[in-house]
Image: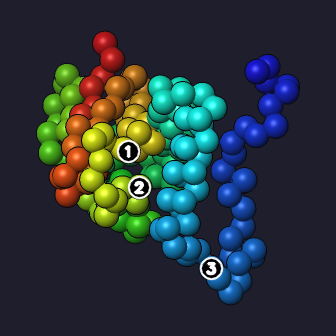
Amino acid sequence: MTEQKRRYRFSWELLGDIALGRPNLGQNTRIEVYRLMQFCFRDVMEKELGTEKADQIFYDAGKLAGEEFYNNVLEKVSDFNMFVKNLQAVLKEMGIGIFRVEKSDIENGSFVFTVSEDLDCSGLPELEYEICTYDEGFIAGLLESFTGKQFKVKEVDCWCTGDRTCRFTADMVK
Ligand SMILES: [Zn+2]
């Protein structure tokens, strides 16, 4: 779609002034509400577009979210360990998940991350597949924003596949 025809281009301002808009209800809602929206979007996207396309949209939306999150929420630092430390603190503070680095090979751009108590999937029934496609994109968006390099992120373990944490590999596209 050409740029001038776009109606829904994301901007951080779209998230609104929550203190003004929800003086009584405030920042919080229940996780079910977030998951309800996410899984209903996914259902309709799959019906309309097929599984592969639905996954791609989820990944790309997560990536856009990761980029916006990086630009609007995270403190800008140049050191990778500082970046991870800030990210860990913010993800925990915002109730997104408990983020850890399991493997970090900065030189080759190869990482393994885990997210426990993940907003998207912790506590879901066991399924045949990893479910956190949005998170894959989210992590890719964060890493790409921080490094300026392209990354491919894949969830390899998930609450839904019997692991009690989500595990993601992230590899720089060379
Ligand atoms: Zn997961």
Q: Amino acid at mark 3?
A: Gly
**x and y percent of residue 108 in the render?**
19, 22
Q: Residue furthest right?
A: 4
Identify the residue at horizontal 44%, vertical 66% (top origin): 94
Disc 1 to disc 2, how far (Cα)?
7 Å
- At x 40%, y 34%, the residue is 140
Q: Which mark is residue 26?
A: 3
Residue sitting at x 63%, y 32%: 48
Crowding around mark 1 (Cα neighbors within 10 Å: few <14, some 14 to 19, many 20+) is many
Q: Which residue is mark 2?
A: 120
The residue lying furthest to the top in this view is: 174
Residue 110, quarter of the rendered image: top left
Q: Residues within 10 Å of mark 2 (few under 14, many from 20)?
A: many
Residue carrying label 1: 132
Residue 142 screen position, x and y as percent: 42, 40
Looking at numbered disc 2 in the image, what kind of residue is underneath it? Asp
Which comes sooner in the sequence, label 3 or label 1?
3
Q: Position of residue 135 (x, y in %)?
A: 40, 44
Q: Relative to 47, is 1 above or below?
A: above
Secondary element under disc 3, as helix, strand or loop, is loop
Q: Nearer the viewer, residue 161 or 5?
A: 161
What crowding class fits label 3: few (fewer than 14 Cα within 10 Å), some (14-19), or many (20 or more)? few
Label 2 C-beta lies within 8 Å of the nearest ligand 1 atom: yes
